[in-house]
Image (tube, coloured by chain):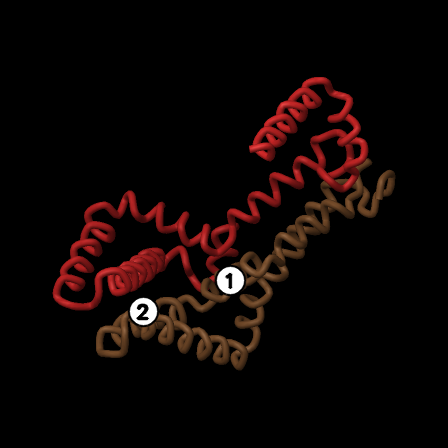
Chain colours: A brown, B red
Amino acid sequence: MKGQFVFASPAIALALLLATLAVFILGPVILIHMSPIIRVIFQLIAAVTIYDWIKNTVGPGILSLVISGILIYIFVIALPGLTAALWATYYVVGMGLASMFIWGFTIFSGKG
Amino acid sequence: MGSLLINLLFGGVLEKFNLVILGLKLVILIFIVGWVRVHIGGGRWGTFIMLLIGYLALFKYWFLTGPIAIIYLLAISGITGLAMDVVFTRQYYTSGKGGLAGMEGGERDAEYANNPAFGAQNQIKANAIKRILKR
């Protein structure tokens, strides 16, 4: 890799990195704004995930239903775009995709 | 312009900021309930401690626990690893050698081997290991 420049400069590599991350993080947000079906599917999955998490932590009962109801209203009904972005960020960062892009774009920038 | 874009994309998140804070408080309450149930149990004492920690963390000292909770949530989602990646890749650009540590390690090893300070340190370490092995 020494002496080769796959990208013209580190600035272009950085711009491409940010664009890739933006596609991964804002893609789901734009999708749920464009398609009502995808939005409903995402809301269903998010609601079930929230209820399951609270039922496992608090235990089955009225309290878990009330808390999960409030959280589902806030994060699924009122702010689905924010939830989609946070969810996508969590997966992109948590599964190491962002690290892979950072290292990849840096190494292929080929300073030397 | 930026706030308009954020509001359009995230469904009026800036106007519903109090709702987001309420959601964050509830998420932290769930963390507290989970921790107390695992470590103390769900009996009378557990409920009392849940309420006590919940009151202290979510109302009385929220100015302290709020930022800590945000940092905690970012840390468990792996943002710290991302920061480390950025630091290491910055080293790639600023080292002046055009390589990550280990990728073009031959030059780096030769440089260390020719450095008398590193040689002396390595000799000290080697002698210490020999002494330990002799025991």
Quadrant where the N terminus of chain A sits is top right
Q: Which numbered disc covers residue A98? A: none
Mark 2 residue type: Thr
Mark 1 residue type: Ala
Residue B43 x %, y %? 16, 68
Determine whether A53 is above or below A24 in the image: below
Quadrant where the C terminus of chain A sits is top right
**Which residue lies under the disc numbered 1?**
A85
Disc nearest the viewer among 2 and 1: 2
Query: Going 27% across and 78% down the picture, which residue do you hit?
Result: A60
Question: Which image quadrant for residue B108?
Answer: top right
Question: Which image quadrant for residue B19?
Answer: bottom left
Alpha-carbon distance for marks 2 and 1?
A: 24 Å
**Mark 1 secondary-structure assignment:** helix
Callout 1 crowding tier (Cα within 10 Å): few <14, some 14–19, many ≥20: many
Q: Are marks 2 and 1 in contact (CB under 8 Å)?
A: no
Is A29 in front, or is B75?
B75
Question: Which chain contains the residue that carries disc 2?
Answer: A
Residue B76 x %, y %? 45, 54
Query: Going 18% across and 63% down the picture, which residue do you hit?
Result: B46
Determine whether B6 is above or below A56 in the image: above
Is B49 in front, or is B24?
B49
The reply, left or right, for residue B46 in relation to residue B130 is left
**Mark 2 secondary-structure assignment:** helix
Query: Going 60% across and 39% down the picture, which residue do you hit?
Result: B87
The reply, left or right, for residue B68 in relation to residue A82 is left
**Which residue lies under the disc numbered 2?**
A57
